[in-house]
Amino acid sequence: MDLLAQLRAGQVTAQTLSPLNLSQYEKVVFVGLGGSIMASEAISMLWPGVTTSESCKPVAVSLAEVVTPGWLDQSAQYIVRGLHLPHWINQKHLIIASSWSGETAETIGLVKQAIAQKIATIVITSNQESPLATLAKTANLPTIMLPRLVEIPRLAMPLMLGAQLTVLGQSVILNEADKFAQALQDKATQEAQTLTQVIGDKLTLIYSSCAWRYLGSFWKTFINETAERHCFYNFIPGALHNEIAAIKSEGNQFCYIVLSDRNEDELEINQLTRLASWFEKLQLTVLRLEITGQSRLEKILYQYLLAANTSALLPGGKHNIPIAIKDFKKNNKPN
C-alpha cells in the first residue's frame, strides 16, 4: 500500500467535482459499511469535538463555518449505521455515500431514500458499471469515480479519505502526510511483527477512549476480514460498567489491546491505565499500545497501517475479500 499515493489520488479525483457551497449545509451525514466507511470514521476522529456539562448541545451552524477554519466538529457529523436515514434529516444536510464496489445493497437503499427526500448526495465509488454508479447517473448525483489502485475496500481507506477531505474543503490537511507517510509505513511494518508474536492464535479484545473508538473499529475490520477471526472492541467508560464483569483470570484465549493517547483527558488516561493494570493483575495477555503521532491525522493513519499489517501477519491472514462474505451477499440479496 502506498499511503501518500492513495491520499493524493483521492484528492485529485475529488477535485474534478464542482466546488460545493458548504454554507447551505448544517451537517454532513456519512453512509457506508465495512471498509468503505473507514474514511468517514477517520474524519470523525480528526475533529472529535469537546462538550462540557455547560455546553452539551451541538450548535446549529453551517458546514462552512466549521470547515473554513479547519474544524469539522462532531456536532456537524453523523455516520449512518442502520438501514434507514435518520428521521431528522432534511435538505440542510449533505450526504456522502461511499461504496468501493458500488454494489453494497444497504448503501444503495439509503441513497434511494436520499433521492426520494431530495437530500443533496455525493456518491463515492470505484466501479463505473455498478448499481450505485448507475443510480447516481440516473439521478444526476455528483459522483467521485476513484481509480482502482487496490481491490479490497479496507485497503482503499486513504484513497477515500483524500476524496472526502477534498469534498469538505479540507484537503490542505493532507500536506502534512508528505512529511511522515513513508516513515509511518516502515514503522508499522516493524511493529506489526512484534505484535503478531504476542497475539498469536488468541482472540483480540480492544479498548480505547470514546474519542478514539473508531480505531478499535479499524482493528476489528482488519482482524475480522484479513485474519478471518473474531475480534471485538469497546471503549471507556462504558466497558468499565458492564464488560469488565466477564473478564476472568482463566481468559487465556484472549489478547487484550488497550489503546491510549497520552494527550487525552487525564480521567480517560487513568481509566485506561487502571483497565490495563486489571488485565495484568489477572495475568492475562495485554498489549498497551500508545496512540502516537504529531497530529491526529498521523495518529489515525498509523493505527490504520498497524492494524492492516498485523492482521496480515496473523496465522491465516491474507488481504482479500473473504469467501464467507461473498457467499453471504450472493445468497442474501434483497428482493
Image (tube, helix red, strand yellow):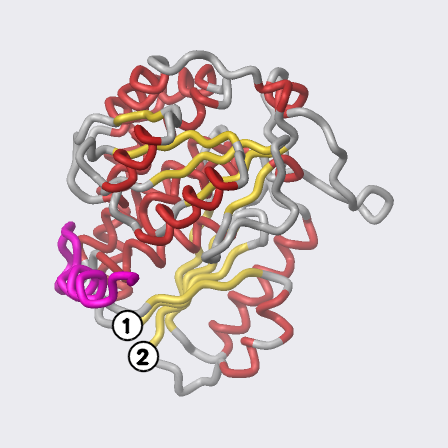
Q: Secondary structure at mark 1?
A: loop
Instruction: Tally the numbered discs.
Output: 2
User: Please, is residue 106 above or below residue 199 in the view?
Assistant: above
Q: Type of residue at label 1? A: Lys
Q: Type of residue at label 2? A: Gln
Which label's residue is closer to the chain start, 2 or 1? 1
> Horizontal and vertical percent for residue 183?
29, 28
Query: Quadrant where the C terminus lies?
Result: bottom left
218 vs 260, left or right, is left
Residue occupying image coordinates x 26% and y 35%: 134
> Horizontal and vertical percent for residue 106?
37, 53
Q: Quadrant of residue 222?
A: bottom left
Residue occupying image coordinates x 44% and y 44%: 31
**Depth check: 26 or 68 in front?**
26
* Farthest right residue in view: 54
Q: Is residue 257 visible?
A: yes
Q: Which residues are magenta?
A: 315-335
Residue occupying image coordinates x 53% and y 34%: 118
> Horizontal and vertical percent for residue 281?
51, 76
222 vs 244, left or right, is left
Determine the CA span between mark 2 and mark 1: 5 Å
Residue 103 shown in magenta: no
Disc number placed over residue 253 in the picture, else none: 2
Q: Quadrant of residue 59?
A: top right
Query: Quadrant where the N terminus lies?
Result: top left
User: Please, is residue 202 above or below residue 157 in the view?
Assistant: below
**Depth check: 264 or 40 in front?**
40
Disc number placed over residue 202 in the picture, else none: 1
Disc number placed over residue 146 in the picture, else none: none
Asked if the residue under mark 1 is in contact with the one under mark 2, i.e. CB atoms within 8 Å, the reply is yes
